[in-house]
Every structure is written in C-alpha cells, then in structure tokens.
Amino acid sequence: MPEPRNPFIYGVPVPPSKFVGRKREVRTIFDQIAGPALGSVAINGEHRMGRTSLLHYIVDPDVAAGWGIAPDRYVLVYLDCQSISGFTPTRFWRRVLGLLPRWPGDEGPRGAVERLLSQEGVACSDLDAVLDGIHRSGRKLVLLLDEFEWAIRTDTEEDLATTRDFLSGFRALVGRVPRALSLVVATREPLEALCRPIRFIGSPFHTIFVSLTLRPFTREEAEELIDEYLRGTGVEFSEEDRDFVYEVSGGHPYWLQNACFKLFAGKPGGEGLYEEIAQALRDEGL
C-alpha cells in the first residue's frame, strides 16, 4: 500500500478547497461587498499570515456563490500589484481592464474598455464610462488587490504627488453614483500607516475601508486545520503532537503548516523528533 502523501502546505498560498479558519474575516468581507452600501475592506497582516490565501478564497467562484455573489450580479477580479513592473497608474488600469470579462454584444462596458486600452494613458477619471457600463449590465465590480503597497509610492516628492492623485481618484471612483465599485486590498502594514506620508487635499484614501488585521490562528482554528488536512490520510496527531505544533508555531499559519508538514514526514518518529523540527524551523527563520 503506498505511503500517504503529506497533506500540509507551506510556502505557497493554500487552494480554496484547503482554506481553513478566518471565519470572522470572511464574513466581514462578504457582508461589505454584498451589502447595500457596497463597502470596501483593507486587510493587513505580517509576512506569511495568509493574506493571499484569503483573497484567493474570496475570489473563488464556488465560494463567492455560496455567499450570494453570483456572476450575473458581480464581477470579481484578483490582481497582484507586485506583478506590475514599474508601477504606474496607467499600467495598473491597463492590467485591470485586461482582466475584465468580455461581455457579449452591447452588454457591459466592452466599447469603453477597448477605447481606453487604445489610449496612451489611462487615469482614474477615465473609468467612469467603464463603471457605467458595468452598472447598466446589472453588475458590480469588486477588485481584490494583493500587495497593494506597491501602488503607494512615497519615496520622492514626485512619487507622493502621483500617489496622492491616484488614490484620490480611486476614492472618487468607489464613492461615485451609481455605486458600481468595491475594493478589497491587502497589505503588510495597515493602510492608514502606508498613507500617512501623503498630504491628501480632501478625505484620506484609507477612510473608505473597513480594516481587518490577520492574526495567528487560535487553538480552535489550528485544531480545525489539523483535522481537515489529516482527514483520509490514515495518520493521526496525538494531543501531545498538537500541543507541540501549536506551541512551536505560535499559531502563525505558515509556521503551523510547516511544523505539521515536518511532523507528518517524520512519523512515527522517535525520541528527539520535536527538537529536530523546532531546530529546522529556527534554521528557516522562525
């Protein structure tokens, strides 16, 4: 009989089918984007805390449908801002426009999208026609923007001015009537802290968001993760095993998965296995 495959995942975002925990955060996000106000959410959390996994989970069509986010009413677009080489507002909007679905016939904003993609530059104010077209199609646009700090450039006075204009225009798009745009942004530091150096002329960008901070898993969430990942493997973690992986990881999702991966690989193990795993995690930067 073949050995069971190690089910634990670390170093890459977990697929939506393996997403565990974050129930409060998930509910808050869907309550905002599906609510009458079409709200926006800013997620922050330290390195490897699961920001990307959370966004991938939210944008998954089956998950979204379970929360009433149907494709005939919402367009969900995920974009990793880090992937935009030499970030500029024009390059950002070109990527967003390129990710929008191709509506058939005259439905939606197809004509406006094509016109903007043919322009040399694209600014926030140019998106009015696109959002109007999305609204006419009976839909709302939700942008899930990962690594959004790449869009907040504050190194020079020129960067500050460009970023101020970009974020101010973005804020105006979210607040325009008819309401057709919601944002879910993810950053390492809180959005308010990232925007602090920027001297906004009007209301600051970050004030349109509900803020969520991702923290280490509770013991209950860690137990849920272990049970879910071990299901069907024929392998069990004892109470002592569970105490160890939670204590050594502090509930941090990356280090918890890492510790569980090593424990699974080392079973049945012997005396000294816990210390070997703890030392390996320290060598990796824990």
Image: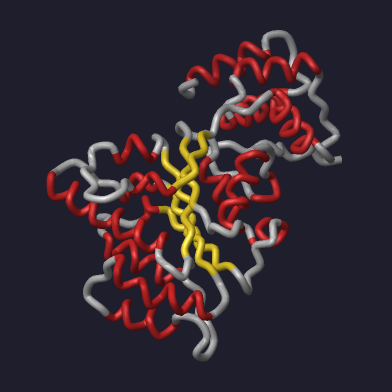
Q: Is residue 161 above or below residue 5?
A: below
Choose top left, top right, bottom left or bottom right for residue 275. top right
Camera-nearest residue between 173 and 225: 173
Relative side of 219 to 134, left or right:
right
Please identify the residue farthest to the bottom as the structure is shown: 105
Look at 30% across and 41% down and name the residue there.
Answer: 195
Q: Classify the position of the N terminus by image quarter.
A: top right
Quadrant in the picture for residue 53: top right
Whole-percent x, y for residue 279 in the image? 55, 14
Tell me where residue 28 sits by quadrant: top right
Q: Is residue 119 above or below residue 256?
A: below
Q: Does residue 253 appear to the left or right of 18 in the view shown?
A: left
Q: Could you tell me residue 138's position as x and y percent?
A: 57, 76
* Colouring used for the render: secondary structure
Which residue sits at x=53%, y=58%?
38
Q: Nearer the viewer, residue 223 or 168?
A: 168
Q: Position of residue 109 (x, y in %)?
A: 45, 80
Residue in the image at 39% along x and 35% along y = 189
**Rendering coords of residue 214 (x, y %):** 54, 34
Is 55 drawn above or below residue 220 in the view shown? below
Is 17 situated above or below 181? above
Name the residue: 40% across, 65% down.
176
